Amino acid sequence: MGIINVNNLSKSFSYYKKDVGIKSSFMNLFHREKLSKEAVINASFEIDEGEVVGFLGPNGAGKTTTLKMLSGILYPTSGEATVLGYTPWDRKKDFKMKFSIVMGQKSQLWWDLPANESLHLNKYIYEIDDKAYQSSLDELVELLDVRELLKVQVRRLSLGERMKMELIAALIHKPKVIFLDEPTIGLDIISQKKIRGFLKYYNQQTKTTIILTSHYMNDIEDMCRRSIIINQGKVVFDGQLNMVNELFSQKKLIKLQLSNSVEESELKKFGDLREYAGLSATIEVNKTELKSYSQIILDKFPVLDFNIEDIPIDEGISLIYQKGGEQDEIPAKIL
Amino acid sequence: MKKIYKELHKHIIIYFLFMKNSLIGYMEYRANLFAALTMELVYLGSKILYVVVIYNAGININGVSPDEIMLFIGTYIIMTAIYTAFFMDNFYKLPEHIRNGTLDMYITKPLSLQFMVTLRHVNFVLPVPNLIAGITMVVLACKRLGITAGFINIIGYMGILVSATIMAYCVFLIPQILSFWTVKSGAITEIADKCWDFNNMPMIIYNKWMRRIGVFIIPVFFITNFPAMFLVGKLDGIYFIWTFIAPIIFIVLLRLFWKFAIRNYTSASS
Amino acid sequence: MRFLQKYFKAFLMGLQSSMEYRADFLLSVFSGAFIIVIQCFLWTAIFKSSSNSVIYGYTYPQMIAYSIMAGLVAKIVATGFEWEIAEDIKNGGLNKFIIQPIGYFYYRICCFFGRKALQLVVLFIMSLAGLMFCNIGLGLKLEVPRIILFLPFVFLAMVLNFMIYYCLSSLAFTMAEVWGVFVAAGQGIMMLSGGIFPLDVFGEKVSAILSLLPFQYIIFYPVNIVNGKLSFEEVMNGAIIQIAWIFIMIILSNLCWKSGMKKYVAIGG
């Protein structure tokens, strides 16, 4: 049993259809078409204590919805889940005391007040005693290097600084599990890096289980050993991120720099010609033929530079996104 | 029992923190404050206009003298002050919390959600003119009517004000809860606000059926009429009993409705 | 004629948005009816308890007609665009009007009437029903010429009220937070234009002062035309002053907007 167990979790929403134009506004007076959307479909996975797991997927894939169900904000349409042994949507107080959620675009801080007032409020909300509060606060403030900013009004803070405060507010009661929804959204690269570094360190030190969603590849690559890829409501991949590559390891990229230009049709014989600009070319070839083809290419053409590369991870994932709905066999093969 | 006491204690401490935070937050917007005060003064003016009209007409209306009417309207203005102090900002913000999704954050906190959302802000400035005007009018009216400031009168009046405050909380929160279903809730707020205006005049001017509805079904009359009725000795029989029962009934109803709305929100929203 | 098309488009946009918000409109009519109910009960109680048949210069049917019609006229002339203008000023929505060859003022007024078009149908039917009720139920004397005169007067009242709020909305150039002012002004104008009580209740001195202001031509005057309070001479005089006020407000709003725009452009939106 992991710290989080999810079994066949599904969620669907209903909404009304709306077209633009004066005629349809008029028609809407009388009739509205009801539609429903499957946001999450039969998601199942298990997460152990101390893991850092990333949810990846395009916008609207169901990442946030899954996170909201796990934090008890939403009831599922069907399926089960336990977090720390509790069913999240029962919203037991004991459960709430032990986890935390940070949503990149929703603040829990009082906008017009210095952050320390909000933190002080959390001290009482989470029933933390003075000593534990002080030491926890000191530690977090030190790690994130924001001591001077505690007394500045939240609305005067930069986006990155505000996110640091949000993290402190979320971690001040030492939660066992923390959910992060797009924690680095809108931040500059340096702030993103700092926040990633902090979370990584925090996880190593405290063994807090961290679940995060992001659509920044770097977030996930950097922090998460394991990632769960969701597309169109379905879990399409669950495993180590570099294993995504194994999916594509049947294919390799050969990158060439040539001293004289070579006919396009000549290069096409070897495989899929991805890029071609006279003196440079990228060819996608099957792994099985890599060796023999390499030989031929080197012999036959005026090669200046020769490289063999993996298919980039971003690309691999977007391929998985596309497969999303119909092909469930892919992750099964990997696991 | 001990657990309940502990929770209560926690909520009270947090309520004080809410008050403190509201106060600090308020200091931030002086320009805003001035505008809001102007607004409140104009509204106060239009309430006092009713008193002026009655005094100028100079007659007893349905057996109620202008002085008694001033007592009613003064109480109404005090209740308006209480409402603006403790509830108004929060109730207006409820649809906003739903729209922005900040409600999601609050749901995950180990604290009563209803408490956190509906009692989070306390307004220290807006109620001031109403409070001063209202108390002045009540005191003046009592003097003219020969109502003494005895122990029973004061305690009774205050007690019924508390009961009326609870009713104000319930009656005006219920329509706001509808914003869990419709995103555009401006009109709902407007209707609720206008309902409050029915108290511009004591309920005695309305007919029997409206009075019954306004006391027992949508108890807006309860909120501003009962405290004044107690002072002039007209709060008797079923009304007197209702003063104690109604808050309990309405708190239960509100709780049920709130839980239903949250349940709906957490299963339907995205 | 092509240049008129864009203003017609603005009118249509207003019309469309009024359909979008139809539920809000109907609910606001409903809530607007509350004040009518309150006033009617109040005056009924006062007339019943009084030995006089004329109070503040009104007979009972006249007073009831006043209360009903004042509530409806208040809805007819009601604005709401001032909030949008404030938004435009604050968030730089005005920029596109500086660039595009469409006058902001014309855009706003076309949009305003577009938004009103459907509401007016509903409100005029309600007004007619209200008057019929006063006529049949309470024996209010109704004269057709008065009803006909009422229509252009109400139209001008809409224009006048539009101008006043258009002027007011230019405050958003100088003030960061205008909502308090808008709400206060809304309630103040409502009171001073006779939307709650006929202005006669203020007493002679105050109503003499109020007659020097434009507000009474928004509600008080049109309503007193239909309920038979004003003589034809007074109506004609009123019409002239009302039109004069519209021109004054146009000049004033021009001044306000010019200085506001100067500031707006200087800051760069």
Image (cartoon, rainbow, N blue to C red):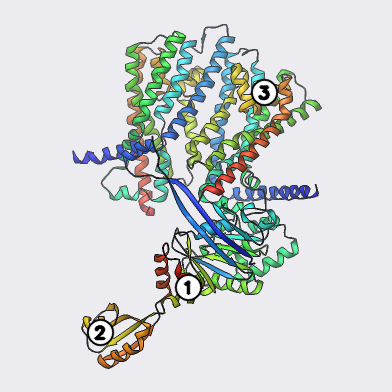
- Spatial CA span between label 2 and label 1: 39 Å
> In terms of secondary structure, where does tag 1 sit?
helix
Q: Residues within 10 Å of mark 3 (few under 14, many from 20)?
A: many
- Spatial CA span between label 3 and label 2: 95 Å
Left or right of C140? Residue A283 is: left
Q: Amino acid at mark 3?
A: Leu
- The spot of residue A4 in percent (x, y) is 61, 64
Closer to the observer: label 3 or label 1?
Answer: 1
User: Circle 3 sits on which residue?
Assistant: B71
Q: Which mark is residue A61?
A: none
Rendered view: A222 above or below C59: below
Q: Which mark is residue A333?
A: 1
Which chain hosts label 1?
A: A
> In terms of secondary structure, where does tag 3 sit?
helix
Q: Amino acid at mark 1?
A: Lys
Q: In the rendered image, which quarter is residue B167 located in?
A: top right
- Mark 2 and mark 1 on one chain: yes
- The spot of residue A145 in percent (x, y) is 60, 70
Q: Amino acid at mark 2?
A: Leu
Q: In the rendered image, which quarter is residue A32 located in?
A: top left
Q: Quadrant of the N terminus of chain A?
A: bottom right
* Label located before the other in sequence (2 or 1): 2
Q: Which mark is residue A279?
A: 2
Q: What residue is at 33 percent from the left and 40 percent from the top?
A: A24
Which chain hosts label 3?
A: B
Which chain hosts label 2?
A: A
Q: Is residue C88 visible?
A: yes
